[in-house]
Amino acid sequence: MRILVLGVGKTGKLVAEVAAERGHSVHVLDAKENKDAAALTAPFVAGFDIIIDFTTPEAVVSNMRACLATGAKMVIGTTGWYDKLDDMKSLAERRGAALLYGTNFSIGVQKMLDLAKKMSAALKDSGYHFAISETHHESKLDSPSGTAITLRDAVLETIGSNNEVPIHATRTGEVAGIHTLEAIGHGDRLLLTHESKSRRPFAEGAVRAAEWLASRTGVYNVREVFDKL
């Protein structure tokens, strides 16, 4: 496939490397080359089979508007833009485009979310309450992380949305990502933790998602399809 990667941060660079390793033709655009999505003209976008975005919350919406309007296929690994999700879904559906988005493309994280639902279901009637902590590198812009919010949603889906599940976010050093769900009882505490040792699982998941999406149209959350990637 011909893949366009938007964003040359640490994850974006790794996405490009993984895509090339898997035999795809890759072109990368950085922020200077694509200010306000100016590079994403219809003829340029038409030269690619799929687009993977790992930019910033400020840039990603403009990128989606430009690309989805042409009927393009996009995998969005950027988080922090979900207040515009309904608009982007509508645009993709009107234009016959394809959009696959998610807060985390790591298969390990997706399995953690499943385990979090089982853990909270098992403990919800036993006097436990739940909290989440997450730690990321200093350059991560959104806080709390999209993954932490998704984790909270998974717990609330099980214990009821009227409950409180606080999130504590820390930004320090070069941490790729640590997420912990804590179940706190009267005399004990249970922890479910996912620790990323590198960004490679995110990159590999995003490229596999692009390969899956290439033959489809419509709008998908990675939570719905991760077991097919």
Image: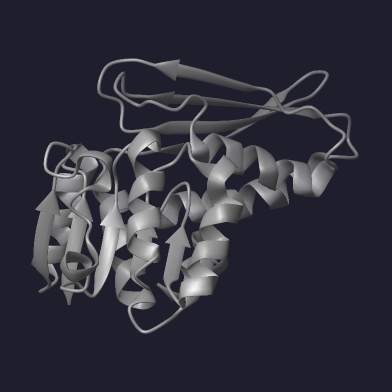
Whether 218 is drawn above or below 137: the answer is below
Towards the viewer: 142 or 149: 142
Give percent across and percent down for residue 222. 49, 61
Residue drawn at point x = 21 percent, y = 44 percent: 7
Residue drawn at point x = 59 percent, y = 37 percent: 149
The quarter of the rendered structure image containing the N terminus is bottom left
Whether 203 is drawn above or below 48: the answer is above
Could you tell whether 147 is left or right of 40 in the image?
right
Whether 87 is drawn above or below 124: the answer is below
Residue drawn at point x = 14 percent, y = 46 percent: 13
Towards the viewer: 181 or 228: 228
- Residue 161 figure quarter: top right
Q: In the current view of this chain or complex, which residue is farthest to the bottom?
A: 215
Residue 193 seen from this side: no
Give percent across and percent down for residue 192. 57, 37
The mark tally for this picture is 0
Give percent across and percent down for residue 63. 33, 50
